[in-house]
Image: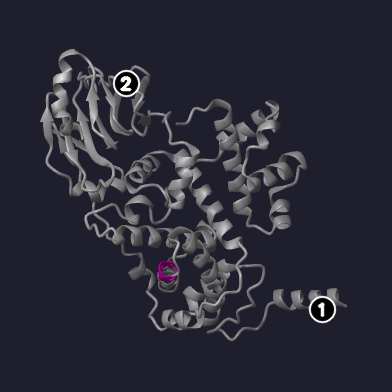
Amino acid sequence: MAHAIKFHPGMSLLEQHAEGTLSADVALAVAAHIDLCPHCQQLSRDITADLACQLAQQPVKTNTTDWQQMLNDIMAQPQLSKQVAAIQPHLPAEPIIVNQREFILPRSLQRLAANRGKWLHLGGIATAKLPAGNDYHISLLYIDKNTEVPQHTHLGLEMTLVLAGKIVDENGEYGAGDLLINSPDDTHTPRTMADEDCLCLSVLSAPLKFKKGLTRLLNPLQQFFY
Amino acid sequence: MLKLAKVARHDRGSSPIPDTQASMTRPEITNNNWEEALTFVALQRDRSAYAELFNYFAPRLKAFGMKMFGNEQQALEMVQDTMLNVWKKAALFDASRGCASTWIFTIARNVRFDMLRKKQSRKDDISADDLWLNGEYPEQEADIDTSQWDTQLLMDKLAPHFTSLPPAQREIIEKVYLQEKSHQEVSDELAIPLGTVKSRIRLALDRLREALDGARN
């Protein structure tokens, strides 16, 4: 049975995503969630229709722009046939292979993931950077079964979208499509179950900081997770 | 007399006109029927239908662009790029999937997003095509979820939360739930598409649900 998605982006995130005003990195995590979540697909459709209606209904002043010139320029161009217009630079969905496991990513991540960096391994954890970060660092994060990510806190915002498998932390259990957002105040110790590994999309605005005992020795390695 | 004239026009419009086959006569675009106009642009390269669309949307897109970019040059670049896409790709518009205004808005949003990214001159980067599906996700099964909420919302007497809704959504919720008007009546009354009435209701219900249980992030 399909996993019922429990953790969604809030309405204001969805609204800003539909409007196109989120920072691209955060927008990518929201877009990938929407790809996986029928409920948010419907909401996004509705929000977009609503924004469009507002745009179409706004009153405008008669203004001084010379529209005629622009109109003529446009209509001087040839129209495209339906076949030509419909052509999209569409990559066939290449599966991602890590730890001898194959994963098909959501549509929004496929193009960027095809240009990902090398997988870096540390214990049961592997990460590969996506070439998209601006203010944020975006990576794929693979966690083998029965593995714990050492307890850490966040120097910035952490968004984790579960793409496949399952992960648990002190606050609950997360499956494919669930979106976790952790602020600098949150501390958690995510881990996988004994029988199921996990692939996530991780969006970080600052490196992780490890909290406990010897794992603090990992702090020099925080670039690994970033 | 005015009324009579209107009726006469209406009759003329709806009676089957013996058409010269190749070019259907296009009725004047009334009641903001931009879906029809776009269809004529797509099927017949109808320049006057396109001009009407352009004259309506270009100034509104410019206002949107001014809000987003804060300067006229970029706003106009966005308008030109958007309306050029509307002209060239009109064949892709599918009225059964949504309003013309929604289609045009999404083109403008994507053009604007890619303009901003280009300004930052980064190539291997997130693009509008990554963020927004070009087309529709497969249709989901009926909105059982929403109708359950319809009943429960009434029972829970959510009226106090109505005031926190955006005005456009509140107006529709009041008409539908307090004045018991049909979606079609509300659509006619406010002169907005039926789909927009329905989507505003769903959005309002989701907002109210969020206000209630705060389950979403």
**Residue B131 percent location from the top left of the image:** 35, 50
Residue at image location 67% in from the left, 43% down from the top:
B170
Rendered image: mark on residue A185: none
Q: Compared with residue A8, is residue A131 higher up or lower down, i.e. above or below? A: below
Q: Output the chain of dot 1.
A: B
Is residue B139 in view?
no
Looking at the rendered structure, which numbered label has been put on residue A187?
Answer: 2
Alpha carbon distance from label 1 to label 2: 73 Å
Q: Is residue A116 visible?
A: yes
Q: Which portion, as a residue range, is magenta?
A: B73-78
Query: Secondary structure of the magenta portion, mostly?
Result: helix
Vertical side of A35 occupied by B123: above or below = below
Disc 1 secondary structure class: helix
Say which chain tag 2 marks.
A
- Check disc 2 and give the amino acid type: Thr
Q: As drawn, is B217 to the left or to the right of B13? A: left
Residue B210 coordinates in the image, percent (x, y): 55, 32
Q: Position of residue A22 (x, y in %)?
A: 40, 47
Residue plotted at (28% across, 44% down) = A135
- Relative depth, front residue between B22 and B54: B54
Q: Nearer the viewer, residue A220 or A12?
A: A220
Q: Which residue is mark 1?
A: B5
